[in-house]
Image (tube, rainbow, N blue to C red):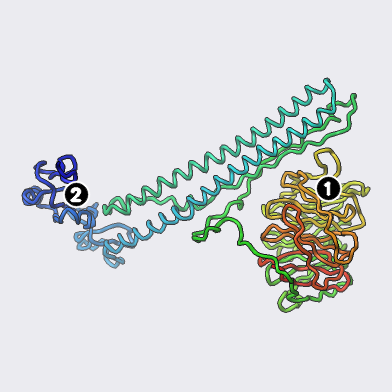
């Protein structure tokens, strides 16, 4: 039986005689030859310097581009000033006299190196990033479906309490829900289609670059137009926000209004929502943070004296600096390591700030309860961001998306709600649960604190209810944490300040028991932090998961290592 490696259908034949087996190759003309036809091939065109090599060594000789000014000449040099290949005749004509020249083979290597780097960037960073973006959009679409199903269920349950005369209204509202859902899903699908199209284009670009890299035809190399710069600009992140069904009391004369209405839905575009995937080979790259364990015995790292009569708040500017505020119109920036005062900012109104936070860009934000404003400090200048009517702002935090979450009390102290702002624009209001009952106890006697967890849950300590209230990004109640027994001092739970860390733990200050509770993102108690705390109020954590506690009476901030 004939060996398949030498069968007629597998053996390559000479391009000239078409019968003999290929033994040689002309790298200049890219022609396969048998030994007998080599002489005939060379003599057929004596104007070229034919490079004949063994067939196994084919494509080893670079193909020099032909000179555009001298048709029969090949370019051996490259003029960097004119950015073109040049031949010997070009050099003899003095057209490039005094210009910086390089051997074209060196330029070839430089171009290949650049293309190889860009190909690797597309392959290792940009394309995987778009894969992550596509996965993120798909997950959001799945979550959107779930949340809208929950929304439809809430409407249905409320509708069961009514009689046949409200059936049409139920259908109308559910249709509106479906319309909003479809609109948002269509927007996300369009976003996903654009991402998939870009991913396909990137793959084509990678394939094109790999073809050029493997090909020694320099004319093709010089013709490559890279699109990597365009792909580096990641798309805006599209974030859907669900409407909220707000039920009302049943009154037949005002059936439509009292049944409940849907708040408007929205989609925002976050320019900084996506981050380029790192090239780190760790399986955790671009995903969850490394898992850390809680210490059996948390330890105090340092203590900072602030000089306030009463200390209320602390916010991390960095791992080296913290902002503080207390019973004073001045907010102070301290060095953590030195304990020294670095800067002071006085409120614009002359009232003391109720809460402070730091934005992603490092700007200080504070609420002015009696002035009804939320303000931001940029380059030591105070700008009013939000001014309220009939409401007073208490707690504030800056979210991962750059929004501000503000918890506020009504002027009559009968209502409390959380409002999400993008700049000065109100985007979302969180006030009632699915049954129309208030999520938060109204109170004007106590400061209200608020923070966002890594899973985008919104966490609010409710001192009157003696609970930490946690809702989802959509404003749906997830759970309420009411403390753990036995408490360190056997006094009822009294939550004040709140913070979260890289593990999505929720930390809340228990004012009466002089400690901090740590719970997981689902409300399960984990442990207490004591460390000799005295009337803890405001909390914050740095990027290394160190806890900072503002203590009311002794006016000190305590830095605690607990993980």
Instruction: Give whichever of 142, 313 is nearer the camera.
Output: 142
On the image, the x and y values in percent for residue 21 come to 12, 46
CB atoms of marks 2 and 1 within 8 Å: no
Is residue 329 visible in the rendered image? The answer is no
Residue 527 can be seen in this image: yes
The residue lying toward the viewer, choosing from 351 and 12, is 12
- Outermost residue, top side: 164
Q: Residue at x 26, y 54 (%)?
A: 216
Residue 32: image location, x then y, percent: 15, 48
Are there few (<14), some (14-19), or many (20+) residues within 10 Å of tag 2? some
Displayed quadrant of residue 313: bottom right
Q: Is residue 455 left or right of residue 63?
A: right
Secondary-structure class at tag 1: strand
For the point 67% across and 59% down, the residue is: 503
Q: Which residue is mark 1?
A: 417
Write down the quadrant of residue 304 in the picture: bottom right
Q: Position of residue 5 (x, y in %)?
A: 18, 46
What residue is disc 2 on? Answer: 30
Q: Position of residue 238 (x, y in %)?
A: 62, 44
In the rendered view, tell whether residue 187 sits above or below residue 107.
above
Comparing 533 with 175, the one in front is 533
Q: Is residue 322 above or below residue 156?
A: below
Mark number for residue 89?
none
């Amino acid at each position: 039986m004939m060996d398949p490696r030498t069968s007629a259908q597998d053996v390559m034949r000479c391009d000239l005689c078409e019968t003999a087996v290929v033994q040689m190759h002309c790298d200049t003309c890219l022609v396969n030859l048998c030994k007998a036809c080599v002489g005939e091939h060379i003599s057929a065109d004596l104007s070229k310097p034919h490079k004949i090599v063994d067939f196994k060594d084919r494509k080893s000789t670079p193909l020099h581009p032909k000179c555009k000014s001298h048709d029969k000449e090949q370019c051996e040099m490259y003029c960097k000033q004119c950015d073109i290949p040049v031949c010997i005749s070009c050099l003899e004509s003095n057209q490039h006299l005094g210009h910086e020249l390089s051997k074209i083979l060196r330029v070839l290597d430089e171009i290949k190196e650049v293309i190889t780097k860009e190909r690797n960037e597309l392959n290792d960073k940009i394309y995987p990033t778009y894969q992550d973006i596509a996965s993120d959009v798909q997950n959001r679409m799945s979550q959107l479906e779930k949340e809208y199903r929950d929304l439809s269920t809430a409407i249905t349950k409320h509708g069961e309490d009514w009689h046949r005369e409200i059936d049409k209204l139920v259908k109308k509202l559910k249709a509106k829900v479906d319309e909003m859902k479809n609109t948002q899903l269509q927007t996300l699908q369009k976003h996903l289609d654009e991402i998939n199209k870009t991913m396909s284009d990137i793959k084509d670009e990678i394939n094109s670059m790999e073809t050029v890299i493997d090909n020694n035809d320099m004319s093709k190399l010089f013709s490559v137009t890279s699109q990597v710069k365009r792909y580096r600009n990641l798309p805006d992140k599209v974030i859907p926000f669900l409407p909220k069904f707000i039920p009302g009391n049943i009154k037949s004369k005002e059936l439509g209004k009292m049944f409940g209405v849907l708040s408007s839905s929205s989609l925002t575009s976050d320019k900084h929502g996506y981050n380029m995937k790192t090239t780190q080979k760790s399986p955790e790259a671009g995903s969850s943070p490394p898992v850390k364990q809680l210490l059996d015995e948390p330890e105090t790292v340092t203590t900072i004296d602030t000089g306030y009569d009463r200390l209320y708040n602390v916010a991390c500017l960095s791992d080296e600096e913290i902002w503080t505020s207390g019973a004073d119109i001045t907010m102070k920036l301290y060095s953590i390591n030195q304990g020294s005062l670095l800067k002071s900012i006085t409120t614009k109104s002359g009232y003391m700030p109720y809460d402070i936070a730091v934005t992603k860009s490092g700007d200080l934000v504070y609420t002015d309860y009696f002035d009804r404003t939320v303000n931001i400090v940029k380059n030591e200048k105070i700008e009013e961001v939000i001014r309220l009517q009939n409401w007073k702002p208490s707690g504030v935090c800056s979210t991962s998306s750059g929004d501000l979450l503000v918890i506020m009390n009504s002027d009559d102290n009968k209502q409390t709600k959380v409002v999400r702002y993008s700049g000065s624009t109100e985007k979302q209001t969180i006030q009632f649960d699915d049954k129309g009952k208030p999520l938060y106890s109204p109170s004007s006697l106590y400061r209200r604190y608020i923070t966002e967890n890594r899973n985008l849950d919104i966490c609010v300590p409710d001192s009157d209810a003696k609970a930490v209230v946690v809702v989802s990004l959509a404003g749906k109640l997830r759970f309420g944490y009411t403390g753990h027994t036995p408490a360190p001092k056997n006094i009822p739970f009294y939550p004040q300040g709140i913070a979260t860390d890289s593990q999505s733990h929720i930390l809340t200050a228990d004012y009466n028991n002089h400690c901090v509770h740590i719970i997981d993102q689902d409300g399960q108690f984990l442990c207490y932090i004591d460390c000799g705390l005295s009337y803890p109020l405001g909390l914050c954590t740095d990027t290394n998961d160190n806890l900072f506690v503002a203590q009311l009476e002794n006016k000190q901030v305590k830095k605690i290592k607990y993980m």
